[in-house]
Amino acid sequence: MAGSHHDKHVFPELRTAVSGLTLCVLTAERADEYHALIDRNRAHLTQHGDYQALAASDYKTAHAELLNDPSPSLRCGVLLHGALVGRVDLVAVNPPKYGFGYWLDREATGHGYATAACRALIEYGATVLGATDVFAGVTHGNGKSGAVLTRLGFKVAEVFETYTRYHLALVASPCTYPA
């Protein structure tokens, strides 16, 4: 039911348009894999000045983050053939308005995975959560993240000193996922 509280057990895995690329709720059970992903991407995560805190996190911090239930927001792992290659979040800032964030393993960029993963979660947000608007911020210089948002239909909403805020207005469609 649009606008209702989602249940993590209803969203065990979300398929994307890319074969073998899925989203799952990112929980503490994947802490080892998540920390290894962060660890091998520290330079990649901070090359534009963003994700400083995440890149500085140790195993204990990363594990503790995954222990915290983000509800009603969604924290999803991006899986490629079952291996964790990134993260995408839909943040319940003021539902039906949501914030949005994503990042991929450096080795997984350039293949359309970010666009496919983001599109799947945004569609889920619109159809199941009743999201009407999604906002994302991109640090200046991070042209690849801006390009992902542009491909998804986001428009520049505001330009700040260090980042650009993007906005996507959603039109809810009939629910295609279990509510």
Image: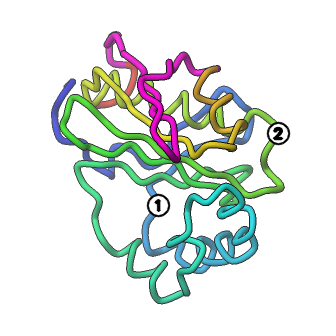
Residue 42 placed where, x, y %?
A: 69, 72
Q: Can you give x and y, in whole percent of width and height, for residue 81 in the image?
A: 74, 51
**Crowd rating for badge 1 (residues with CA inside 10 Å; few <14, some 14–19, many 20+):** many
Q: CA distance from mark 2 to mark 1?
A: 23 Å
Left or right relative to 149: residue 105:
right
Which residue corresponds to mark 2? 110
Residue hosting label 1: 26
Q: Secondary structure at mark 1?
A: loop
Relative side of 64 to 45, left or right: left
**Observer-nearest of 53 and 4:** 53
State which quarter of the image contains the C terminus: top left
The crowding category of the residue bearing disc 2, from other C-alpha atoms within 10 Å (few below 14, some 14 to 19, many at least 20), is few
Reply above or below: 178 against 142: above
Q: Residue at x 59, y 80 (%)?
A: 32
Q: Amino acid type of disc 2? A: Gly
Q: Which of the 4 image quadrants contains residue 70?
A: bottom left
Query: In the rendered image of this protein, does residue 101 appear above or below residue 52?
Result: above
Q: Earlier in the sequence, mark 2 or mark 1?
A: 1
Picture colour scheme: rainbow
Q: What residue sits 43% from the left and 41% below the top?
A: 100
Give the residues in magenta.
151-175
- Which quarter of the rendered picture does the N terminus lie within? top left
Residue at horizontal 68 percent and vertical 43 percent from the top: 142
Residue 97, given in percent of the width and then of the height, sits at 25, 31
